[in-house]
Image (spheres, rainbow, N blue to C red):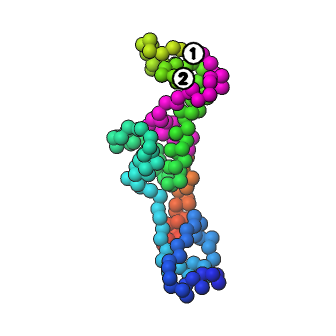
Amino acid sequence: MCQISTFEASRKGYLVCATNCPWELDTAFIRRFHKRLYVPLPNEQERYNLLKLYTDNTPLETTHECWEPILRGTEGYSASDIVQLVQHALTIPIIQLQQNKVWKFCDHYYEALSSRDSFDGTYTIHFADFNNLPPNSVKARNSTINDLIEALKEVKKTVGDEEVQKYHCYVKNY
């Protein structure tokens, strides 16, 4: 409290604080702050913008329609939840490599052979565990929108409806 009082007396800047549990703060502490802001969970457009930001360096489909199932699936997600979702989705191609046993060797790299690949004679097929391939010789596929959809099965929202109601109550009373 003493440090905050000293800061208030100086008037040389702004003190910005954040908490996920404002109802647990001491009322004397809360009184020291003249302005309180509630930042709600991101809406659909904000979630779209966050997803685009976090996947900016990843080649994914770019039409808004491709994102529809993900935007519906992320209703109630926080920005942090969306970060976790994208990080999980980006690891899916790596996890698949570790589980793969059938490889195509093309352009000096081993790539996981997919059932969608047609044999056109431009590569050779190898059977091996991931750990038995030479170091730095494996190339992962690019992440896809489907990886994000798959990640939705694993990464769930962390802010429940009850907690959102608590925030609304708090904002209403303070």
**Is residue 46 depicted above or below 112 in this figure?**
below
Q: Residue 41: in sight, yes or no? A: yes
Say whether residue 140 is magenta. Answer: yes
- Label disc, if present, on residue 173 of the rendered structure: none
The residue type indicated by label 2 comes to Tyr
Residue segment shown in magenta: 127-155
The reply to whether the C-beta atoms of the residues labelled 2 and 1 are less than 8 Å apart is yes
**Residue at image x 50%, y 44%?**
86
Task: Tell me which residue sits at (52%, 62%) in the image.
Answer: 165
Front position in the image: 51 or 111: 111
Question: Residue type at mark 1?
Answer: His
Residue 126 marker: 1
Comes first in the chain, label 2 or label 1: 2
Residue 163 at what x, y percent from top left? Answer: 56, 60
Q: Quick one: SS at disc 1?
A: strand
Residue at x 50%, y 77% (from the top left corner): 14
Task: Give the class, few, some or many, for how many residues have Cα within 10 Å of label 1's Cα (few <14, many ≥20).
Answer: some
What residue is drawn where x is 59% and y is 32%?
95
Seen from the viewer's position, the closer of residues 50 and 153 is: 50
- Judge whether residue 82 is colored magenta: no
Point out residue 40 in the picture as x, y percentages from the top left corner.
47, 62
Of all residues shown, which one is farthest toward the top? Answer: 121
| SS majority, magenta | loop
The N terminus sits in image quarter: bottom right
> Residue 69's x, y, as percent?
42, 41
Q: Which residue is mark 2?
A: 110
Real-space CA distance between mark 2 and mark 1, rounded to the nearest whole angstrom: 9 Å
